[in-house]
Image: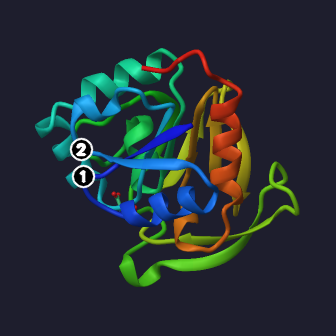
């Protein structure tokens, strides 16, 4: 299995290290040609406006949209979740726009209001998961076809739609590989959509 990590800006190395820890080949992706031969893609947290602009500048927006339409597995964390959403209430750049969720950026407040909290994610073995929320987005609405895997204060913070997985926090900043493993299991169940 070979997983790409979009490497335009943000927490790239941490995702790559987490995939290595799971014994999975992981490569940074900066160019459209680097999408070839991948089994899945992770879009890291960072700044969605910056990543969105660079996705256009590096001609990655269309190829990633095409892949997502074909069922290619993509995991978006924090800014990555923002970029996957079909509708973002306050994003000035284009986004990949492939997941049926409505998102508001920076909705938990300013940088100083970032926080960490223990979450319950029943789909993971042992359930409890430490969530690191850094200027995180809020998912305001989800389509009926979107599975809510975890909520915080009544708002979804981990969602899945087909082969798309997204979370509002930073699992790569903890030592806990279970959410990445969960994604790899999605990827393993779907070997037909290699680019
Ligand atoms: N505030 C950022 C944004 O909207 C997301 C922050 C993050 O990825 N930690 O892009």
Can residue 76 be seen here? yes
Look at the numbered disc 2 and give the secondary structure of its residue: loop
Q: Residue at x 68, y 51 (%)?
A: 181
- Total labels: the figure holds 2
Reading the image, the residue beneath label 2 is 30
CA distance for labels 2 and 1: 6 Å
The picture places residue 167, in percent across and down from the top left corner, at 57, 52
Q: Secondary structure at mark 1?
A: loop
The reply to whether dot 2 and dot 1 touch (C-beta < 8 Å) is: yes
Residue that protrudes farthest toward the left in the picture: 57
Instruction: Place residue 184 in its image quadrant.
Output: top right
Q: Nearer the viewer, residue 176 or 17?
A: 17
Residue 47 higher or lower than 51, as above or below: below
Q: Position of residue 74 (x, y in %)?
A: 50, 36
Mark 1 residue crowding within 10 angstroms, few (<14) / some (14–19) / many (20+): many
Quadrant including the C terminus = top left
| Ligand 1: image quarter | bottom left
Q: Residue at x 31, y 48 (%)?
A: 90
Mark nearest the camera among 2 and 1 is: 2
**Number of the label disc, if any, that sits on residue 135:** none
Which residue lies at the image location 17% right of the left edge and 31% below the top edge? 59
Q: Is residue 154 visible?
A: no
Residue under numbered circle 1: 8
Above or below, 185 against 104 in this view is above
Q: Residue 179 in the image: x percent, y percent?
A: 67, 55
């Amino acid at each position: 299995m070979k997983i790409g990590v979009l490497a335009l800006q943000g927490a790239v190395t941490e995702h790559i290290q987490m995939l290595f820890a799971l014994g999975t080949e992981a490569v940074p992706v900066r160019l459209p040609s680097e999408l070839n031969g991948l089994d899945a893609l992770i879009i890291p947290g960072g700044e969605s406006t910056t990543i969105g602009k660079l996705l256009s500048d590096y001609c990655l927006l269309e190829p990633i949209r095409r892949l997502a339409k074909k069922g290619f597995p993509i995991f978006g964390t924090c800014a990555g979740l923002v970029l996957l959403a079909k509708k973002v209430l306050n994003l000035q750049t284009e986004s990949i726009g492939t997941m049926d969720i409505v998102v508001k950026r920076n909705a938990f407040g300013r940088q100083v209001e970032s926080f960490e909290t223990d979450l319950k994610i029943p789909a993971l073995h042992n359930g409890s998961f430490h969530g690191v929320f850094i200027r995180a987005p809020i998912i305001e609405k989800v389509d009926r076809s979107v599975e809510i895997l975890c909520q915080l204060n009544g708002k979804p913070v981990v969602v899945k739609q087909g082969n798309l997985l997204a979370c509002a926090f930073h699992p790569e900043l903890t030592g806990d590989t279970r959410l990445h493993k969960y994604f790899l299991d999605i990827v393993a169940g779907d070997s037909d959509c290699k680019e």
